[in-house]
Amino acid sequence: MYKILEARELAANIYLMEVEAQRIAKRCQPGQFIIVRTDEEGERIPLTICDYDREKGTVTIVFQIVGAGTKKMAKLQAGDYFHDFVGPLGCASELVNEPEEELKKKSILFVAGGVGTAPVYPQVKWLKGKGVAADVIVGAKTKDLLILEKEMEAVAGNLYVTTDDGSYGRSGMVTQTVKDLVEEGKHYDVCIAIGPMIMMKFVCKLTKELGIPTVVSLNPIMVDGTGMCGACRVTVDGEVKFACVDGPEFDGHKVDFDQAMKRQQMYKTAEGRAALKEEEGDTHHGGCGNCG
């Protein structure tokens, strides 16, 4: 059992929880995720790690209510327990494996959309700890849906907030701010974009035109989190990959976003899942490739 030390609502239907999980806190890295279950019969829910404290032995997660499982999670309070809290899973951010001297030479831009702000935060915080100040664009539909602004401001080199409706910060999509920064003379060696699939698609379309290498995190399409369900099957540079076991980070300019989003919609129905399984055969699953 894993005790919830803090539970609070960040915005409408978006919640933050700090969980006591010492072994995970000691080993996790920015970019990785955990799988949580509220009880023995609960749904397995993969969530990217938002923060961690190795000394306290805690891991922080942020989630949005999208179904029965997350709706049940939102009712938990400080002092309650998760039945399962498993991790760290997935590969760490590519930045973690780069030599510090190389990182310090780079100009890095993060683009976070909506709840994607949560997995961006630990990467920016980790970089700050290495003496690297990254620029961060955080986008939300409205001011009321903006999360972790103060936390991000404390670790970012420069923070640019945008809202689709212009109710706060810069007005418009995150892509407009990317364009504006480049036109203002900013140069970036790499961009890391995390958020809704459609947002990442258009960020990558723009950065490809601008010649900025871009990494995306495909955690939005994960379901099972172990490569066995086939939900996060995606084509990257013509090869079949699975976000949960091969990622979640990939070269955004090589991801087939249209195929992934179409597949994501099909996977939501039993009929769609059956069609995908028949069409894809042994490649439908990750891991062993032949699991039932």
Image (tube, rainbow, N blue to C red):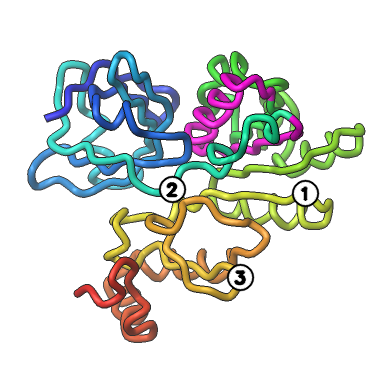
Instruction: Name the mark on residue 91.
Output: 2
Q: Considering depth in this image, is 88 or 3 the residue closer to the camera?
A: 88
Q: Residue at x 14, y 45 (%)?
A: 42
Disc 2 to disc 1: CB gap under 8 Å: no
Q: Amino acid at mark 3?
A: Asp
State which mark lies toward you, 2 or 1: 2
Q: Residue at x 83, y 42 (%)?
A: 179
Q: Is residue 93 magenta?
A: no
Give the Cα distance between marks 2 and 1.
22 Å
**Would residue 162 be seen by someone viewing this image from the given angle?**
no
Which residue of the protein is positioned furthest toward the left in this rendering?
Answer: 40
Q: Amino acid at mark 1?
A: Ile
Image side of residue 41 versus residue 92, left or right: left
Q: Percent position (x, y) of residue 85?
A: 22, 36
State which mark lies toward you, 3 or 2: 2
Q: Is residue 114 above or below residue 264?
A: above
Give the Cα distance between marks 3 and 2.
19 Å
Query: What is the quadrant of residue 107 in the picture?
Result: top right
Q: Considering depth in this image, is 5 or 20 the residue closer to the camera?
A: 20
Instruction: Name the mark on residue 237.
Output: 3
Q: Of the two numbered discs 2 and 1 on the same chain, state the one appearing first in sequence.
A: 2
* Span of residues in magenta: 105-133
* Quadrant of the image containing the C terminus: bottom left
Q: Which residue is mark 1?
A: 212
Query: What is the quadrant of residue 283 in the picture?
Result: bottom left
